[in-house]
Image (spheres, rainbow, N blue to C red):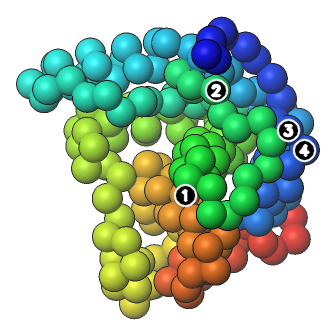
Amino acid sequence: MDTCLPSIRPLYAWEIQAAQRVFGNRIAYHRVRIHECVAWPDIIKQVGLKLQGSPPTKEHNAVTLGNHIYFPIRLPSRPLESSDPKQVLFAWLIHELTHVWQYQSMGWRYLVLALQLQLMHGSHAYDYGDEPGLLAQQERGWKFEDFNLEQQGDITRAYYLRLIHNGDVRAWSPYLVRFQERA
């Protein structure tokens, strides 16, 4: 039985390499710290659900504060095959790395905006409309920054999952091209 004891670590080299497929070199990866097996992100989620009058859930929650990402679980410690079901955990890390990028781009203002989103919209803050939503907003001339902070995180998460499964990323690519351009 694997006991999940709290720990702090930098990103593994393979995590950086995989994240660069989404973010290029637009994140100062060496500053990122992963906190694993930390209970308080799940506690925050349950308190929030209770305040909203929603039933408790068994879904985990992660929190990103600046360059620090707090997970209630242990992430994979080795590279994963694209078919590995644990890829969803790495995609979760991609979502959280979006918040690191936001912090590194706009400072602590990102946290205020993210908290406002959570309070005003709850789980709906993440809804960007998937592929049809991206295509519709592209027609309107939207850029990545026109989506809210949680939508940005879920856009990068979905893009990564499609990318590793050789899926169609055409609806996502125009928004993420900014990360692939040379800094």
First reached walking from the N terminus: tag 1 or tag 2: 2
Could you tell me how far apart the alpha carbons at marks 3 and 4 are, in whole angstroms? 4 Å
Could you tell me how far apart the alpha carbons at marks 1 and 4 are, in whole angstroms? 19 Å
Point 44% across, 30% down: residue: 61
First reached walking from the N terminus: tag 4 or tag 2: 4
User: Is disc 1 placed on a helix, strand or loop?
Assistant: helix
Could you tell me how far apart the alpha carbons at marks 4 and 2 are, in whole angstroms? 17 Å
Residue, disc 3: 12
The x, y position of residue 116, in whole percent, is: 34, 35
Quick check: 111 above or below 51? below
Residue in the foreground of this view, choosing between 161 and 150: 161
Q: Which mark is residue 74?
A: 2
Could you tell me how far apart the alpha carbons at marks 3 and 2 are, in whole angstroms? 13 Å
What amino acid is at disc 4?
Answer: Ala
User: Is disc 4 placed on a helix, strand or loop?
Assistant: helix
First reached walking from the N terminus: tag 1 or tag 4: 4
User: Is disc 3 placed on a helix, strand or loop?
Assistant: loop
Horizontal side of 17 relative to 81 (left or right) equals: right
User: Disc 1 vs disc 2: Cβ atoms closer than 8 Å?
Assistant: no
The x, y position of residue 7, in whole percent, is: 73, 14
Which of the 4 quarters of the picture holds residue 177?
Answer: bottom right
Residue in the foreground of this view, choosing between 126 and 14: 14
The outermost residue toward the left is: 53
Q: Which mark is residue 13?
A: 4
User: Disc 3 vs disc 4: Cβ atoms closer than 8 Å?
Assistant: yes
Density class for disc 2 (Cα within 10 Å; few <14, some 14-19, many ≥20) is: some
Residue, disc 1: 157
What amino acid is at disc 3?
Answer: Tyr
Q: Which quarter of the figure is the C terminus placed in? A: bottom right
